[in-house]
């Protein structure tokens, strides 16, 4: 089975996270400080320098932003 060409769910997440952070916090640094995240972890996620993350980490980020992670197979 092949994925749709150009479909990258992690790329979508990398775009959504900074947008959501900007809605609630003045900066990514402030978000990390207030929510207890290491800035390096979030920076690697957003920049794409790291492509593997624990689901628990993604869930914590989503929860801190008032969102949830949805994983499904279609």
Image: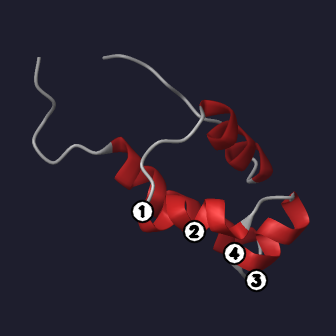
User: Label 3, on which residue?
Assistant: 26
User: Label 4, on which residue?
Assistant: 28
Alpha-carbon neighbours of circle 1 within 10 Å: few (<14), some, or many (≥20)? few
The numbered mark, 3 or 1, whose residue comes first in the sequence reads: 3
Left or right of residue 61, residue 55 in this image = left
- The count of marks equals 4
Residue at 69% of width from left, 33% of height from top?
Answer: 56
Disc 2/disc 1 C-alpha distance (Å)? 8 Å
The numbered mark, 2 or 4, whose residue comes first in the sequence reads: 4
As drawn, the label of residue 49 is 1
Left or right of residue 49, residue 26 in this image = right
Of residues 44 and 34, the one drawn nearer to the viewer in this rendering? 44
Alpha-carbon neighbours of circle 2 within 10 Å: few (<14), some, or many (≥20)? some
Query: Do tag 2 and tag 1 residues touch (Cβ < 8 Å)?
Result: yes
Q: Nearer the viewer, mark 3 or mark 1?
A: 1
Q: Position of residue 58 (x, y in %)?
A: 63, 42
Left or right of residue 7, residue 66 in this image = right
User: Label 2, on which residue?
Assistant: 43
* Residue 40: quadrant of the picture: bottom right
């Amino acid at each position: 089975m092949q994925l749709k060409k150009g479909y990258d769910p992690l790329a979508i997440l990398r775009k959504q996270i900074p947008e959501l952070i900007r809605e609630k916090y003045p900066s990514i640094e402030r978000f990390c400080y207030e929510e207890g995240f290491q800035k390096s972890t979030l920076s690697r996620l957003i920049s794409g320098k790291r492509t593997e993350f624990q689901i628990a980490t993604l869930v914590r980020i989503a929860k801190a932003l008032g969102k949830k992670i949805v994983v499904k197979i279609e």
